Amino acid sequence: MIDFKNIEYLKEGNPRQKEAFKALKKYKIFERLADYNPLLTGTIPIGIDLPESDLDVICSCSSLKSFEDFLIHEFQKEEQFQISISHQEKVGAVVCSFMIDAFEVEVFGQDKPTEHQNAYRHMLKEHQLLIKYGEKFRQKVIALKEGGLKTEPAFAKLLGLEGDPYQALLNVKV
């Protein structure tokens, strides 16, 4: 099993993962966010990304306002910088995005340990399912995503899950 808590695994990955590693290191993204326990989540770490997929970095912050101020101070000079506060999953969150090299980075922070945030939990479950069902399954997920489905609904469709695909995916036994 890959240690997704340390981005070093990207160095040995596919070409896009290697490029992501270089960009994250060049801009010191994880070093700059170190106080917020950052984790890379989403589709690039597990190799089901599309060309337009972004680098999703989740963070844990006790104060949304302080985290927002930190992100503005730290990243406002990056290309296409945007920041907002949202209320996903009944918990407030700061969402910040910007460009580094060929990648859009989306930093998501909420007052919840990163290992317990749904983005990380979904990615781990998806990784387990990709290992279990193999390359043909992975290609089907990518095809559904290319057809417009988001990642979790694509997995849910292939697995025949009913109801909210985000919650149903977390309940799958692997």
Image (cartoon, helix red, strand yellow):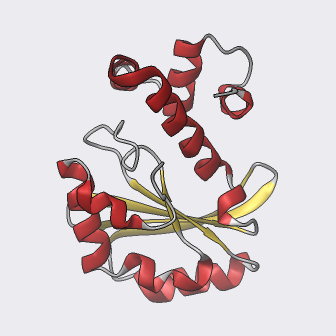
State which quadrant residue 162 falls in.
top right
Q: Quadrant of residue 171?
A: top right
In percent of the image, x 45 and y 52: which residue is there?
Answer: 2
Residue 124, given in percent of the width and then of the height, sits at 56, 44
The residue lying toward the viewer, choosing from 152 and 2, is 2
Task: Tell me the quadrant of the picture where the C terminus can be found.
Answer: top right
Residue 172, position as x, y percentages in the image = 69, 26
Kindly tell me whether residue 100 is visible in this rendering. Answer: no
> How many numbered discs?
0
Q: Residue at x 17, y 50 (%)?
A: 15
Foreground of the two, 117 or 68: 117
Q: Viewed as shown, does residue 13 lie left or right of 117?
A: left
Q: Nearer the viewer, residue 110 or 138?
A: 138
Up-down relation of residue 60 to residue 89 (above or below): below
Image vertical order of residue 143 relative to residue 7, above or below: above
Q: Viewed as shown, does residue 118 lie left or right of 158?
A: right
Question: Going 54% across and 44% down the picture, which residue do you hit?
Answer: 123
Residue at the far right in the pictured view: 90
Q: Residue furthest left?
A: 15
* Residue at far top of view: 160
